[in-house]
Image (spheres, rainbow, N blue to C red):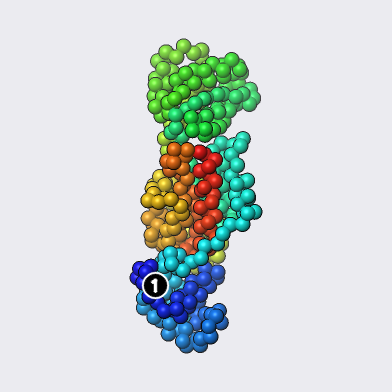
Amino acid sequence: MSVSQIQELNERSREIFREIVESYLESGAPVGSRLVARRLETRLSPASVRNVMADLEDAGLLVSPHTSAGRVPTEVGMRLFVDGLMELGDLTEDERASIEGRCQAQGRSVEEMLGEATTMLSGLSRCAGLVVAPKLDSALKHVEFVALGPDRALVVIVTEDGVVENRLVELEAGISPSALVEASNYLNDRLRGRTMLEARSEILRELDQQNAQLDELTTRVVEAGMAEWGGGGKHNTLIVRGRGNLLEDVGAVEDLERIRQLFDQLEAKRDIVRLIDLTEGGEGVRIFIGSENKLFNLSGSSLIVAPFSNSRQAIVGAIGVIGPTRLNYARIVPMVDYTAQVIGRLIG
């Protein structure tokens, strides 16, 4: 049944279907005809409600789990509700201000800012929050080593897009400030206007052939910085927060096994770049319900995800939440959408 076909249901059927889905999203339990009859604005007997529920089940929108007399929406039914009947909530000014405050990047790296945003989404949604951090593939504007102690330094990387990345590197004790300055100057000469990936092999070759005209201590500083970049952002970074939220309200052994498999897939980080691919084809939030979610291919889970872009309007990452199919979509969708917009503004 398509979204347009749900409009062909009469008003009574749509009202009953909406009540069933909304009740299920609230409780997670199968919904019976007596409960629906009590919730309806129009007075109907439980017997009349049961007849409509049977028709909705025949249409593939509802299913009766196990031997329960109640019904729950199918994936098709949930999709039709989300696309055709759900009324999205709106964020309050306080909620918008809270999201913007938690996402502020001042004094933090992009990855730290995204981690904070993901933690916030996880807490507000009571689901697992996840984000694919953008790879650092922009041309670089400035690199600097800042001493933090006798054996540690901060590598500050500024891209031409204005993105700032901070990486902590461990150094041998006794590295002089002049070695840090020389290492910064060396990398700036070779990286300015180029991506890390473009310049990495050349720099490593110079160091390996001892053609860099650097003393031994400065060479070690450069090598430590290059190692910390680990390929210059060649791979996207997956950040996951709040996995424990998925264990709440787990009522059956099969549910626990499904969550365990999801944990394993999140931990393995397989096909994570595809999380960005899922957002292509249009701006804004995408919702994947149950088996529609090819990334984790687990029925019973839903993914709500939105892309964010850099200053060139190129999609560089995605943020969202994953949880059971009975998510509070009306509340979470605008939350994910606004968070992605704020991140895009900060990165851009």
Above-or-below relation of 9 to 245:
below
Q: Can you say whether 157 is above or below 346 in the image?
A: above
Answer left or right for 172 relative to 136.
right
**Residue 81 in picture, x, y percent from top left:** 45, 68
Q: Position of residue 8 (x, y in %)?
A: 38, 75
State the SS at label 1. Answer: helix
The vertical placement of 41 against 291, above or below, is below
* Residue 29 percent across, percent down from the top left: 52, 72
77 to the left or right of 103? left
281 displayed left or right of 226: left
- Left or right: 294 as drawn, with respect to 242: left
- In the rendered picture of this protein, how many numbered marks are placed on residues? 1
Please give the residue where the numbered disc 1 appears in the rendered image: 6
Residue at the outermost left position: 1
Whether residue 78 is visible: no
Choose top left, top right, bottom left or bottom right for residue 93.
bottom right
Q: Label 1 sits on what residue type?
A: Ile
Q: Position of residue 91 (x, y in %)?
A: 58, 57
Residue beneath the point at 42% across and 47% down: 276
- Taking the spot 58% from the left edge, 28% from the top edge, the residue there is 154
